[in-house]
């Protein structure tokens, strides 16, 4: 095995420190992976709840829209719909979760609502439909935020998992093998030195006896 370290005591100490640092780093990465798993599971549950709520609010919004169409007529409802302004000024911020930049969207429902038509040209059902669809927009923004966070956390977790595998299966075993190589070489050198010393002592005794 080609050793990256020379079989010396200095390199033996350096390699032991390197292994200790790699093992500490591995433990920290494992803690990070566990935290990412917890955060990912929490956001996945949240996404499911938002999806379920969005489906229900969608249903309520379309029911209200249908009632408004019946009471006002399709043409009036279309005019009201055309008067509703499009939303372009969503606020997106980012915050860090375990080193991952997660988007945070300020949904439309949190923005001030502006009247789109006169009270005389509308109805309670139309107002309810408008409010419900704003709620749907808010939920979709929240769902997009949550799913984007899930994707980023999952990517980071996969990256962390690969790093742990690299340390477990390549880096640490390789350095342990090199440490054993140096340890064996040092032990062999010590045995040779001991044998030479014994031979020198024996030769010295023989010369004195002569």
Image: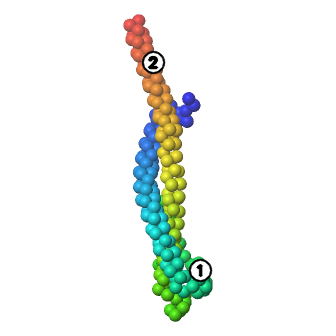
Tell me if residue 84 can be seen: no
Which residue is located at x 49 percent, y 71 percent?
59
Is 115 situated left or right of 42 in this image?
right
**Looking at the image, which residue sits at the far front?**
70
Tell me if residue 155 can be seen: yes
Q: Residue 142 location in percent, x, y?
A: 49, 69
Check the image and report above or below for 154 versus 203.
below
Is 204 situated left or right of 73 in this image?
left
Mark 2 — residue? 196
Q: Sort mark 1 into few (<14), some (14-19) or many (20+) by Cα contacts within 10 Å.
A: few
Which element carries disc 1, helix, strand or loop? Answer: loop
Q: Residue 162 location in percent, x, y?
A: 52, 46
Which residue is located at x 49 percent, y 78 percent?
64
Q: Quadrant of the N terminus?
A: top right
Q: Residue 206 location in percent, x, y?
A: 41, 9
Q: Quadrant of the C terminus?
A: top left
Q: Which residue is at the front of the view, 159 or 206?
A: 159
How far apart are the alpha carbons under marks 2 and 1? 91 Å
Q: Which mark is residue 86?
A: 1
Q: Which residue is at the front of the view, 200 or 128?
A: 128
Which element carries disc 2, helix, strand or loop? Answer: helix
Check the image and report above or below for 64 versus 2.
below
Q: Residue 70 location in percent, x, y?
A: 53, 82
């Amino acid at each position: 095995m080609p050793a990256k370290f020379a079989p010396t005591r200095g390199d033996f100490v350096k390699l032991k420190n390197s292994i200790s640092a790699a093992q500490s780093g591995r433990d920290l990465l494992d803690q990070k992976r566990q935290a990412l798993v917890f955060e990912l599971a929490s956001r996945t549950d949240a996404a499911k709840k938002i999806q379920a709520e969005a489906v229900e609010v969608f249903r309520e919004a379309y029911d209200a829209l249908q009632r408004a169409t019946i009471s006002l007529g399709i043409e009036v409802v279309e005019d009201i719909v055309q008067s509703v302004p499009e939303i372009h000024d969503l606020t997106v911020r980012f915050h860090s979760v375990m080193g991952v930049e997660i988007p945070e969207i300020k949904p439309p429902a949190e923005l001030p609502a502006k009247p789109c038509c006169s009270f005389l040209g509308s109805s309670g059902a139309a107002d309810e439909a408008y409010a419900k669809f704003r709620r749907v927009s808010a939920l979709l923004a929240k769902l997009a935020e949550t799913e984007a966070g899930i994707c980023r956390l999952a990517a980071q977790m996969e990256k962390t998992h690969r790093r742990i595998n690299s340390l477990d299966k390549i880096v640490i075993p390789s350095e342990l093998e090199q440490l054993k190589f140096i340890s064996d070489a040092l032990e062999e050198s010590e045995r040779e030195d001991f044998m030479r010393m014994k031979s020198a002592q024996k030769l010295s005794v023989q010369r004195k006896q002569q």
